[in-house]
Amino acid sequence: MGCRRCIGSLGSVIAAVVLLAACSSATPPAAVAAAEPAGAERQARVPNEYLLMLTSGADESVITEHYARFGIKDINALGDEAYLLILSNDPGPEQMEALILDDDRVKAIQPNLIYWSNRSGRSAK
């Protein structure tokens, strides 16, 4: 993690955060949900967990402002304006994204995807 200049885009930062969060997640594999509808290519995700990237200067209050209605269990600061949000009632990725579309304080949100380091490219079923 010492080479910040190597991470040149928001996508790379989010991928690094996903890797970090997924590796440290205590959620058992039986609790894994699919991020895509049935029939589509599936990417496993941790239910009720999302990764958010805020703009510089924004704080956690932005997260509670948008998502408190879904029962926030925890907000973990991951560093560099990245947060792991854990909810009680997951409305789904589409609604989570729709709630922040017009808020410039939030750069990105995505489900906490599972990184399968021992599966060599296979998707979770």
Image: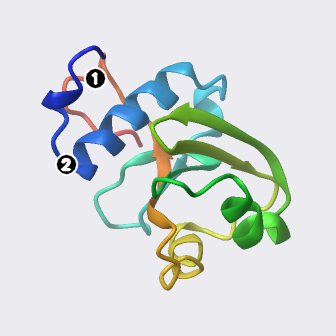
For image coordinates 79% across by 61% down, the residue present is 89
Above-or-below relation of 17 to 2: below
Name which residue type carries label 1. Arg
Please identify the quarter of the rendering in which residue 63 is found.
Answer: bottom right
Outermost residue to the front: 57
Q: Nearer the viewer, mark 2 or mark 1?
A: 2
Marks 2/1 in contact by CB < 8 Å: the verdict is no
Element type at mark 1: loop
Mark 2 to mark 1 CA distance (whole Å): 26 Å
For image coordinates 19% across by 23% down, the residue present is 120
Earlier sequence position, callout 2 versus callout 1: 2
- 20 or 124: nearer the viewer: 20
Q: Quadrant of the C terminus?
A: top left
Element type at mark 2: loop
Name which residue type carries label 2. Ser
Residue 78: percent from left, percent from top: 54, 32
- 43 or 71: nearer the viewer: 71
For image coordinates 49% across by 29% down, the residue present is 22
- Left or right: 125 as drawn, with respect to 92: left
Above-or-below relation of 94 to 50: below
The label number, if any, that marks residue 19 in the structure image: none
- 23 or 125: nearer the viewer: 23
Residue 73: percent from left, percent from top: 83, 46
Residue denoted by label 1: 119
Please identify the quarter of the rendering in which residue 13 is found.
Answer: top left
- Left or right: 86 as drawn, with respect to 118: right
- Left or right: 123 as drawn, with respect to 92: left
Residue 43: percent from left, percent from top: 37, 49
Residue denoted by label 2: 9
Q: Quadrant of the N terminus?
A: top left
